[in-house]
Amino acid sequence: MAKLKSKVTHFALCLNNEGYPASLEVGKLYRIVPDADAEAHGYLRVIDESGEDYAFTTDRFHVMTLPLPVEQTLLSAVGA
């Protein structure tokens, strides 16, 4: 397996997709893209169903820190 960056990757669980049913699925984990500007305004940038990163309000998600082996498996599955 390729060596992954030592930076901790966080994931968020979607709790609410109201208004964005094609972009977000409730109950699905999304990879967070760090974005201090978005966070400062109450948004979380994630890779959505289109495969692109978009900012959504933070109240739509529960941010999760997963054990390293789980993160590595998820990142490997998406080719990150």
Image: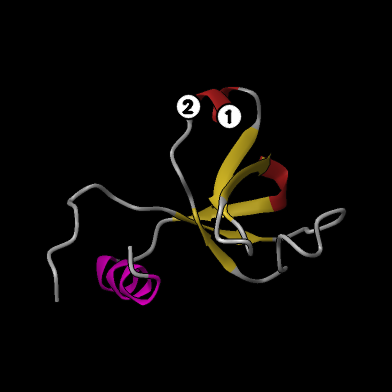
The percent coordinates of residue 27 (x first, y second) are 67, 71
Q: Look at the picture and state if 18 lies above or below 22.
A: above
> Which residue is disc 1 drawn over?
38
| The quarter of the displayed image where residue 48 is located | bottom right
Query: How would you rate the neighbour count of disc 2 (Cα within 10 Å): few for under 14, some for 14-19, many for 20 or more?
Result: few
What residue is drawn where x is 80% and y is 56%? 20
Label at residue 36: 2
Query: Per the image, is 72 magenta?
Result: yes
What residue is drawn where x is 71% and y is 44%? 59
Instruction: Identify residue type, mark 2.
Output: Ala
Q: Give the main secondary structure, helix, strand or loop, of the magenta stretch.
A: helix
Question: Quarter holding the C terminus?
Answer: bottom left
What residue is drawn where x is 71% and y is 68%? 25
Q: Look at the picture and state if 10 lies above or below 22.
A: above
Q: Look at the picture and state if 43 lies above or below 5.
A: above
Instruction: Identify residue type, mark 1.
Output: Ala
The percent coordinates of residue 40 (x first, y second) are 57, 22
Estimate the spatial distance between the alpha carbons at disc 2 and disc 1, rounded to whole Å: 6 Å
Q: Are marks 2 and 1 in contact (CB under 8 Å)?
A: yes
- Local secondary structure at mark 2: helix
The percent coordinates of residue 46 (x first, y second) are 55, 50
* First to last magenta residue range: 68-78
Query: How would you rate the neighbour count of disc 1 (Cα within 10 Å): few for under 14, some for 14-19, many for 20 or more?
Result: some
The percent coordinates of residue 64 (x first, y second) are 48, 57
- Local secondary structure at mark 1: helix
- Colouring mode (rainbow / by chain / secondary structure / one colour): secondary structure
How many numbered discs? 2
Query: Per the image, is 29 magenta?
Result: no
Question: Quarter holding the N terminus?
Answer: bottom left
What residue is drawn where x is 35% and y is 53%? 9
Label at residue 4: none
The answer to which of 51 and 26 lies nearer the viewer is: 51
